[in-house]
Image (cartoon, rainbow, N blue to C red):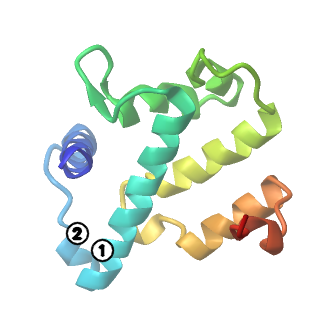
């Protein structure tokens, strides 16, 4: 329920701040299945932001995580400041690529978002993960 509420609030804020009215996704010609997949991609981007920042998707102190993060995502030299301070170290080049993926996941229009297949390909290249290494192994 927290995820759905965060997505709804974020979509409402984006649409009202840009156009003064809500985005009507039904007018985009996307099927229910395509909208569901696009919503899952959006939620994945939101989850990545939670992991990077250590913040909740919607909290009193910062408001919506998406809105808070946009101030950092829009400026490449600022992205390191959105990282959870309890994280001891990170590779800046990997963070940069993850943030690019996040931006493509949270685009306001569903038809502009990457597919999960494209996202996994982006991560595989950026993080140098082979397909074999990506699958869990039996212990």
Q: Position of residue 96 (x, y in %)?
A: 72, 39
Which corner quadrant of the image does residue 120 belong to? bottom right
> In this figure, which residue is indicated by the disc labeled 1?
35
Kindly identify which residue carries mark 2.
Answer: 25
Within 10 angstroms of label 2, few (less than 14), some, or many (20 or more) residues?
some
Q: Residue at x 20, y 76 (%)?
A: 27
Q: Is residue 29 visible to the viewer in this orientation of the structure?
A: no
Q: Residue furthest front?
A: 139
Q: Quadrant of the C terminus?
A: bottom right
Q: Is residue 15 left or right of residue 135?
A: left
Of the residues tagged 2 and 1, which is closer to the observer? 1
Quadrant hosting residue 14: top left
Q: Nearer the viewer, residue 77 or 94?
A: 94
Q: Is residue 139 above or below residue 101?
A: below
Tell me if mark 1 has few (under 14), some (14-19) or many (20+) residues whose alpha carbon lies within 10 angstroms of its own. some
Given contact means CB atoms under 8 Å apart, are the residues at marks 2 and 1 in contact?
Answer: yes
Give the residue at x 17% y 65%.
24
Nearest the viewer among 15 and 64 is 64
């Amino acid at each position: 329920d927290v995820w759905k509420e965060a997505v709804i609030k974020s979509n409402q804020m984006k649409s009202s701040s840009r156009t003064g009215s809500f985005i009507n996704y039904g007018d985009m010609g996307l099927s229910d299945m395509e909208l569901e997949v696009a919503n899952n991609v959006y939620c994945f981007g939101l989850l990545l932001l939670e992991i990077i920042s250590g913040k909740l998707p919607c909290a009193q102190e910062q408001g919506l995580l998406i809105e808070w993060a946009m101030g950092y995502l829009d400026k490449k030299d600022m992205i390191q400041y959105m990282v959870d301070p309890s994280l001891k170290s990170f590779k800046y080049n990997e963070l940069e690529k993850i943030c690019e993926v996040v931006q493509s996941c949270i685009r306001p229009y569903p038809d502009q978002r990457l597919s999960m297949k494209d996202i996994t390909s982006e991560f595989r290249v950026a993080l140098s993960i082979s397909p074999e290494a990506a699958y869990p192994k039996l212990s």
